[in-house]
Amino acid sequence: MEYALVLLTLGIVFALYMTWGVGANDVANAMGTSVGSGAITVKKAILIAAVFEFAGAFLAGGHVTGTIRKGIIDANAVPSPEILVYGMLSALLAAGVWLMVASYYGWPVSTTHTIVGALVGFGMVGLGFDAVEWKVVGGIVASWLISPLIGATIAFVLAQSVRKFILDTDSPFENAKKYGPVYVFLMGVLIALVTMFKGLKHLSLELSTGQSVLVAIVVGLIVAFVGRTLLRRISPVDADAERDFHYASVEKVFAPLCVFTACSMAFAHGSNDVANGIGPLAAIVSIIDTGEVAQESALPLWILVLGGVGIVLGLATMGYRVMKTIGTKITELTPSRGFCAELAAASTVVLASRLGLPVSTTHIIVGAVLGVGLARGIAAIDLRVVVGIVTSWVVTLPIGAALAAFFFFFFKGVFL
């Protein structure tokens, strides 16, 4: 192609911009509850997430990716390689712009759905209405209801169990240490499954579902044993703190569990969602190198590093805004509630992965936070914030599509 170097440079810049948006918006899924509950500070969350997100993207981000993410567009409908390059550029830029706007206002939107909307926009104007796989898009739209509903239900049950077995008893602190290993076991099993299903799926571990569950149970037992040993060493807080906040000692037990779960979810997110930003870049590089449109594109090491760096930069510069929304604005969180929300999110991710449901981690964690809030009654939730979040979900696809369509015509006009 005549403008190969220019197009490659634009692809790199736009991919960095897009992954910056992923870091600014999506990383709050893992860290928002820990920050909002007071388990860790914003600065510590940024440092922890930076390490685990980058590790997930770099170590388990995959060696190949689908040329067109999520099967939204039929690759066979692309008339020429140049058209797909313009489409990928427009999708990256459109997604980056929308994620920047959403992050600025603290709206937790799905980065996956953002890039999907952008691809739909390019597909409709660049390839034709029939080139878009509308059944896949329909499944994604349905997930707007499915994801938060499942997450909220599981979180509600977990929060009620903590209330029944620990908080509403005569000895909350002793019962927290007694039942804590059970929750640690559940956490170990689910986090192991999330890591295998989402965080390590690119490493070609040929394990069946049964084998994965067996490995997860072993991990859960080990984590539970370690957790039991550590929980025994936790002493109650001083009398003044206990008088001011009745469950201060109990929350001291749940705080480290909340952080551990968040770290694991960050690793899984980095490995899985980094492809939203670098997948289109990989397609551009592949087309420039070969001059052909392939079903899958290689992910060179430098592209994975680029994606990891972009995520960390986005998290460090604007990630606190969405963290604040998830952690403090929907409902008041404590470490025990934050732990229930993260555990519910992990459960939903595992369930959705096995059932093949196109769910969004963003929608799941928001639903889970709603669930722990509902466990204390509807008055514990700020419905105005919830309405604003849901509205941002609904407009993500059409806005992404409209921006991508505009940018596609722009690039096509400039280069053709």
Image (tube, rainbow, N blue to C red):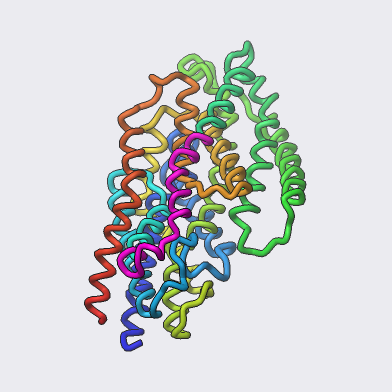
Residue 46 drawn in magenta: no
Which quadrant of the structure image shows residue 106?
Answer: top left
- On screen, 364 above or below 373? below
- On screen, 361 above or below 382? below
Picture coordinates of residue 158 (x, y %)?
Answer: 58, 28
Q: Residue furthest bottom?
A: 2
Between 393 and 333, the one lying in front of the other is 393
- On screen, 137 above or below 330? below
Residue 92 showing in the rendered view: no
Picture coordinates of residue 205 (x, y %)?
Answer: 70, 61
Residue 212 showing in the rendered view: yes
Q: Residue furthest top?
A: 170
Between 313 and 161, the one lying in front of the other is 161
Which quadrant of the structure image shows residue 252?
Answer: top right
Segment colored magenta: 123-151
Point out the image quarter for the N terminus: bottom left
Picture coordinates of residue 279 (x, y %)?
Answer: 46, 67
Residue, x 29% and y 53% (percent of image)?
A: 399
Residue, x 39% and y 80% (percent of image)?
A: 80
Between 124 and 150, the one lying in front of the other is 124
Residue 141 located left or right of residue 343: left
Residue 235 located left or right of residue 337: right
Residue 142 drawn in magenta: yes
Secondary structure mostly seen in the magenta stretch = helix
Residue, x 68% and y 25% (percent of image)?
A: 179
Picture coordinates of residue 102 (x, y %)?
Answer: 31, 48
Point out the image quarter for the C terminus: bottom left
